Amino acid sequence: MSDTADTASTPVLSIDGARATIRLNRPKHLNRLQPDDLAALLRLFDRIEADAAIRVLVLTGTGRAFSAGFDLGKIAERAASVPEGEPSGSAFEAVANRLEDLKLPTICRLNGGVYGGSTDLALACDFRIGVDSAEMFMPAARLGLHYYPGGIKRYVTRLGLNNAKKLFLTAQKIDADEMLRIGYLTALVPIEQLDDEVDALADVLAGNAPQAMAGMKRAINEFARGAFDEEAADARARTSMRGPEIKEGIAAFKDKRAPRF
């Protein structure tokens, strides 16, 4: 996968079989996100989720960084104009929450550093595979910014209380080894192995039963947020026992072949 682009743009979507890839595409500014990028991401998420042929999404960046987060100038503009009573995270929080709630499995291909709000975009993905030169930091405390609630919840539920406090309250940068140790990264690889690692995981996810995965992903996320709908999860489990996916899965197991979902 190429990490270069000729011109900056809103995020770029490519589809290859069962896999969709969204690439943040403002490399000269470390893929710093603008309001237009957030709107484009929401449209792309809707398009991907509406296509049953797409089974897995990879989110990555162009150039040497994954993303430098949301444009600080736009944050300042919003701080001066946000109406009383409107949620603090607004558009950025909506994008991260939408990404987390996508039915299909998601992989963040961390081709480099990840900073600010984009650390939450990566956390909203189901898996994060990063290069060994990656680094991250959350500068909210240094900027005088109280981060939006959804992002804090994701940090705590994904990384644990102590790691969330360290990252938010110290605003200190951590390297790739530490990102792996605290569970921010699912896997850490040299740059030359990044695509192979992402491809292998994407192939596994694309080959599994989509409805079963969607239901279990929903249940896991609900449980992590303390909003587990046990009755709905039980209903999905019961339905799956009579559905076409389990019939194909069992038949494939008996025939010693890969299932065709």
Image (cartoon, grey):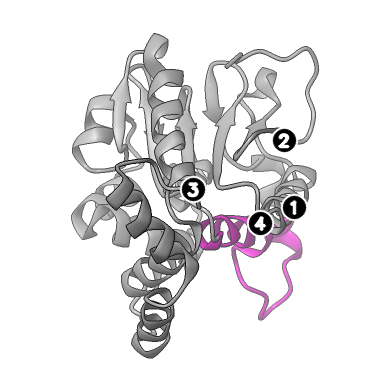
What is the distance, in whole Å, between disc 1 and disc 3 at their CAs?
24 Å
Residue at image position (45%, 56%) is: 209
Q: Residues within 10 Å of mark 4 (few under 14, many from 20)?
A: some
Q: Amino acid at mark 3?
A: Arg
Q: Earlier in the sequence, mark 3 or mark 2?
A: 2
What is the distance, in whole Å, between disc 2 and disc 4 at their CAs?
13 Å
- For the residue labelled by badge 2, is the local secondary structure a helix, a strand or a loop? strand
The image quarter containing residue 158 is bottom left
Q: Give above or below for 144 relative to 217.
A: above
What is the distance, in whole Å, between disc 3 and disc 4 at their CAs?
20 Å
Tell me residue 261's x, y (percent): 50, 53
Q: Which residue is mark 3?
A: 260
Q: Which residue is mark 1?
A: 47
Residue at image position (36%, 50%) is: 252
Residue 135 makes an appearance in the image: no
For this orientation, the residue located farthest to the top is 192
Q: Which residue is mark 2?
A: 13
Q: Are marks 1 and 4 in contact (CB under 8 Å)?
A: yes
For this orientation, the residue located farthest to the bottom is 231
What is the distance, in whole Å, between disc 3 and disc 2 at their CAs?
26 Å
Q: Earlier in the sequence, mark 2 or mark 1?
A: 2
- For the residue labelled by badge 1, is the local secondary structure a helix, a strand or a loop? helix
Part of the protein shown in magenta: 77-102
Q: Are marks 2 and 1 in contact (CB under 8 Å)?
A: yes
Please identify the quadrant where the N terminus is shown.
top right
Q: Residues within 10 Å of mark 3 (few under 14, many from 20)?
A: few
Tell me residue 248's x, y (percent): 43, 58
Residue at image position (47%, 38%) is: 108
Res. 245 mark:
none
